[in-house]
Amino acid sequence: MGRRRKFWGWGYEDEDLSREEKENLAALLAGRFGGAELTVTEPPALAEVRLRAPRVQPPASLRRLFTDDAYERAGHTYGKSYRDVVRAYRRDFSPAPDWVALPGTEEDVASVLAWAGEQEAVVIPYGGGSSVVGGIEAPPGEERPVVSLDLRQLNQVLEVDRTSRAARIQGGALGPDLEAQLKPHGLTLRHFPQSFELSTLGGWIATRSGGHFATLYTHIDDFVESLRVVTPAGVVETRRLPGDGSGPRADRLFLGSEGTLGVITEAWMRLQDRPIHRANLSAEFERLEDAVAACRAISQAGLYPSNCRLLDPNEALYNGAGDGTRTLLLVAFESADHALDAWIGRAAECCRDHGGAVPQEVGTRAGAEGAREGSAGAWRNAFIRMPYYRDAIAGMGVLNETFETACTWDRFEEFNSGVSAAVHSAMDTVGAGRGWLSLRFTHVYPDGPAPYYSVTGPATRGEEIEQWQVIKEAASNAILELGGTITHHHAVGRDHAPWYRREQAPLYLDSLRAMKKTLDPAGILNPGVLFS
Ligand SMILES: Cc1cc2nc3c(=O)[nH]c(=O)nc-3n(C[C@H](O)[C@H](O)[C@H](O)COP(=O)(O)OP(=O)(O)OC[C@H]3O[C@@H](n4cnc5c(N)ncnc54)[C@H](O)[C@@H]3O)c2cc1C
């Protein structure tokens, strides 16, 4: 039997932090919070989870596709946000789906949707379950039976077109699965969200995920050539084209549809050759505004680095990449075709022009090592381990929230100080003022950055969710008022839906609802998410 995933949080059962590591972490954070009391809680055991009896029975003809196994139902109850993990630590699995369906073919998907339509059962498409916005959870108080439709058996690369550099891939393929199948062809999708290991192609497309590329190919959208979607009303398949001008593009309707319009079963994806040239640098700045100016200069110079990650002093400190006194800018380039000396050299000039300290010798290397040394390497390692630490701290009375957005360069300064003031004030209100807020840029565009904020502070045990809610609302209100978007790549789900609806024109939302009525007449697909 293979490794088993945790039913209550991120990752695999064999990869949790040890009790000793958790105790050490609690002591370290308690000190940083000025003496807060942090106690380690044991994660839930399956035997402690109470699930109600399924409210409906699948028909005999489809019974083979369904399971009501407790581990599966518990594991499909929540995504992986802070709030999800806190509820799991509380042993509260009350929104668990009645059934988990595991289709093996596209016909199975259509059969489950048809049966659910007749029964008026809710269907929640499920990829890797890594949603951090309440995207795969049954709506609160939902009285209809709920089926979590897990696509993990649809995990194959079905066809590779080496000439056009594209592949037809099933929606349930996890990141490592699809990369392993592409590797023998010398090709790669190179879409690496932080959740890469445990998220799927269908989930990425449904949420318009953001990968590791800081510029140019920031979202999965850029790699989608065509899609195949099973809706309750039938199948929609779009045409493989490198580009077109034939009216509003059908792919766009399903990109970001978050399981509300149909189930993405397959997509033709644009691929790349594996990079063999790499170059990276790490620049230090005394002042945040100088690092921001350097970042903007690089993003507007037409260099298109694969990484251009600004880390403010807190972000650098808490990820082991700096001492907390300076802002860092990590820049990297990669290419399958050409050496990158000119590109990295010009990026170094942009940093120096704005007062950045850059090592005198900045050069290119073959292979992956370049990005894995020094500050960049330290930050990268912390980044990969972060979700395990996040789950551990959620269980010891530490409040944690991450929120991300995008805004134009002209308003960034005012935006950042406004968001920061609103969040600090909310942290004070809930008694988490001894914690900290940190900032990084995950992606940068010629016209603006995508800022990503992390809040960490001491929580009051038993009140974590209420405290989280106060901070979430303060941050989200400030973001909208100051001209940002409620999400750059984490998606809308249920958590962001109120702000998404404020962000969009009412007539546009009505148009989407009309479209949903056509594709999902019984309203069974992921109610409560986005506009639905
Ligand atoms: C530790 C961590 C790090 C993360 N890092 C990133 C990051 O770097 N970039 C980023 O963009 N996001 C990130 N996320 C958020 C999350 O990983 C993304 O939203 C991801 O795209 C979700 O993919 P999934 O397969 O897990 O989808 P799920 O969580 O299973 O589902 C997400 C949504 O998509 C719908 N859905 C899933 N599959 C399908 C399908 N085949 N057809 C139709 N609808 C479907 C679901 O109904 C739900 O609404 C992170 C999350 C965690 C926990």
Image (cartoon, rainbow, N blue to C red):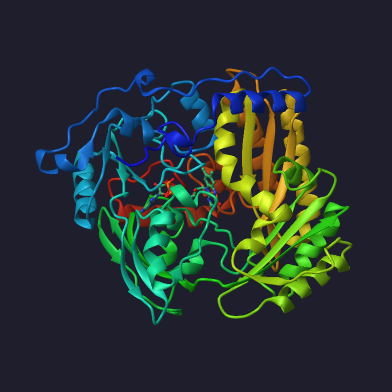
Residue 225 in sight? no
Give the residue at x 72% y 30%. Answer: 427
Q: Is residue 331 left or right of residue 239?
A: right
Quarter-of-image position of residue 146 = top left
| Farthest bottom residue in view | 163
Q: Is residue 28 left or right of residue 206?
A: right
Quadrant showing the N terminus = top left
Q: In this picture, is 36 found above or below 343? A: above
Measured as percent of width and height from the top left, residue 94 is found at 38, 24
Give the residue at x 41% y 57%. Answer: 201
Give the residue at x 38% y 29%. Answer: 95
Measured as percent of width and height from the top left, residue 77 is found at 39, 33
Measured as percent of width and height from the top left, residue 512 is found at 43, 56
Residue 464 in sight? yes
Q: In this picture, is 454 found above or below 328? A: above
Quarter-of-image position of residue 239 = bottom left
Q: Which of the pair 142/223 is nearer the observer?
A: 223
Q: Number of numbered discs present? A: 0
Measured as percent of width and height from the top left, residue 219 is found at 54, 62
Q: Which of the pair 70/23 is nearer the observer?
A: 23
Quarter-of-image position of residue 477 = top right
Q: In this picture, is 94 found above or below 353? A: above
Q: Which of the pair 523/134 is nearer the observer?
A: 134
